[in-house]
Each structure stands twice: as structure tokens, then as C-alpha cells.
């Protein structure tokens, strides 16, 4: 399950390093002018011309920008405690793909978190590069496939998807399939791995703002902690919306 561990590290990092909402602006006219930094020029003006310079110099600089300006720092280490293959079909997509549904379990600080990972792999290929990403209404939304386990986690309401009481329904199957193009991915020799972001951290709001009592956060809290701590005295913005 090395691929599972790699996928989860990448998919989950944006959720467990966030802090909390501050004042969020929805008016584009109030957005100040900003120029993106050059991707392949370091902060001291060094041109990044090879992979070694990227990994040693530029990549850490960019990650630091995300830590300081957007998400915050990773609060701790969290490993997969165990996994269970819930379903596997080696003849998916009319026989050209392998479909796996895996339940990943994380345990820490006396708490447990379960995440459903959906994987499609090309059938006749020993190794395949993966497209990875969050989906925002459940694994069942990315393709018309009745075998995909229906999302049971809290879900944002969307009447068009048949979600009215924060619970996914059969009506939501395949509603966002146009975003994923799974057949094309498999035909090109690639695989796909996705999880529902709400398994990791539901975007729920309580009386005092965003609710940090569920999802991945409590597994990383210190004793007595109930929400992510400010970074440099500032509560950073974060949003996992669609």
C-alpha cells in the first residue's frame, strides 16, 4: 500500500496544516493588486535550472510562503494506523481498469478518523502515474458507477445533487463526472486516486465560526486544545470550498 500512503500524504496536507477563517473577502473589487513571484527564480535572484536546485532552494521557499501566508505549519505527524480493502474489481470500466476502494484509518490522541480512498488503475500496466485530488461531494460523484460506496460523511447541501440534509443520496452519483474524465485517464495509461475532502475535514460552521471539533484536527491537538493555534499572532485564512 505504498501508493496509498503517498496519495494520502499529498491529498491531506492542505487540510491538517490549516488554521482557521479570518475576515474573508468576496468582493473582487477589494482585492489588491498582486504579482506572482517568478517560479524558477529564487528569492535572492538565483535562476533555478535543474531539479537539484528546485528541491534544495526553490521548493522550500514556495512551501514557506504557503506556511506564512495561507495554511500555517504542519502541527504534527500522523500515520495510517491500518487499512481495509472494502471492494476491488479487476474488470472495471468495461474490463480496462482496476477499481479499489480502501478504508484508511488514522488513530491518535485517543481519537480515530476514517477516510475512503477510491482508486482506478489501468488493468494491463504494472506501474502507472496517478492523477490525485479531492472531490467535494463524495467519491460517488466522479463517475456513473453503482459499485462506488455512497459517501456517509457530512456533505454541503446542494439541491441539484439531491443533497438537502447534509447527506449524500443516490441522486448524486456521477453528477461531477465531467470534471474527472476517468476513461480518458485510463486510456492514456494513467491512474486516478481521490478522496472526499469532507472525510478529512468537513467545512462546517458553528456558532463561533468554522467548526474544528471534527475531522482531522482533534487528532493533532495537544491536551486541552480545541482549535488550531494562531500563527505569528494572526489567524490565517483557509477554505476548501469547491
Image (cartoon, grey):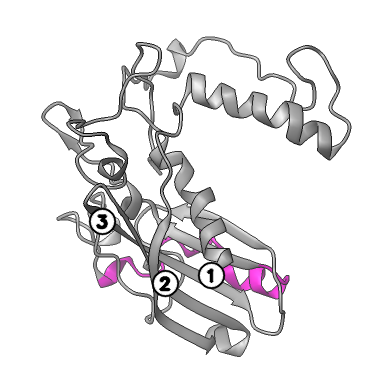
Q: Which residue is mark 3?
A: 112
Q: Is residue 84 above or below residue 179?
A: below
Q: Is residue 111 above or below residue 55?
A: below
| 131 magenta-colored | no
Mark 1–mark 3 Cα distance, whole angstroms, equals 20 Å
- Return the x and y of residue 175 as percentages of the image width and height: 39, 63
Circle 1/circle 2 CB separation < 8 Å: yes
- Return the x and y of residue 180 as percentages of the image width and height: 54, 61
Badge count: 3
Residue plotted at (43% across, 65% down): 117
| Quadrant of the rendering where the C terminus is positioned | top left
In the depicted view, which residue is nearer to us: 197 or 31?
197
Circle 3/circle 2 CB separation < 8 Å: no
Residue plotted at (22% across, 45% down): 214
As helix, strand or loop, the secondary structure at mark 1 comes to loop
Q: Which residue is mark 2?
A: 102
Residue plotted at (45% across, 65% down): 142
139 sits left or right of 157 in the view = right
Q: Which residue is mark 1?
A: 1
Say if residue 215 shows up in the picture.
yes
| 174 magenta-colored | yes
- Return the x and y of residue 143 as percentages of the image width and height: 46, 70
In the depicted view, which residue is nearer to us: 161 or 237?
237
Question: Label 1: how many residues lie within 10 Å, few (<14), some (14-19) or many (20+)?
Answer: few
Amino acid at each position: 500500500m505504498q501508493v496509498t500512503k503517498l496519495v494520502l500524504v499529498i491529498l491531506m496536507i492542505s487540510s491538517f496544516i490549516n488554521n482557521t477563517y479570518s475576515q474573508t473577502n468576496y468582493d473582487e473589487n477589494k482585492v489588491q493588486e498582486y504579482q506572482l513571484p517568478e517560479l524558477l527564480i529564487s528569492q535572492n535572484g538565483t535562476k533555478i535550472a535543474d531539479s537539484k536546485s528546485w528541491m534544495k532552494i526553490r521548493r522550500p521557499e514556495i512551501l514557506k510562503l504557503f506556511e506564512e501566508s495561507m495554511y500555517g505549519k504542519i502541527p504534527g505527524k500522523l500515520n495510517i494506523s491500518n487499512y481495509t480493502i472494502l471492494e476491488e474489481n479487476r474488470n472495471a470500466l468495461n474490463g480496462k481498469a482496476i477499481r479499489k476502494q480502501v478504508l484508511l484509518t488514522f488513530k491518535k490522541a485517543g481519537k480515530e478518523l476514517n477516510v475512503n480512498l477510491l482508486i482506478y488503475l489501468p488493468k494491463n500496466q504494472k506501474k502507472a502515474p496517478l492523477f490525485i485530488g479531492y472531490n467535494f461531494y463524495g467519491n460517488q460523484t466522479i463517475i456513473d458507477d453503482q459499485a462506488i460506496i455512497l459517501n456517509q460523511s457530512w456533505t454541503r447541501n446542494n439541491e441539484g445533487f439531491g443533497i438537502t440534509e447534509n447527506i449524500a443520496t443516490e441522486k448524486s452519483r456521477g453528477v461531477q463526472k465531467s470534471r474527472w474524465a476517468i476513461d480518458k485517464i485510463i486510456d492514456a495509461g494513467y491512474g486516478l486516486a481521490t478522496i472526499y475532502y469532507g472525510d478529512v475535514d468537513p467545512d462546517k460552521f458553528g456558532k463561533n465560526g468554522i467548526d474544528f471539533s471534527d475531522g482531522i484536527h482533534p487528532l493533532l491537538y495537544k491536551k486541552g486544545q480545541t482549535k488550531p493555534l494562531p500563527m505569528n499572532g494572526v489567524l490565517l485564512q483557509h477554505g476548501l470550498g469547491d
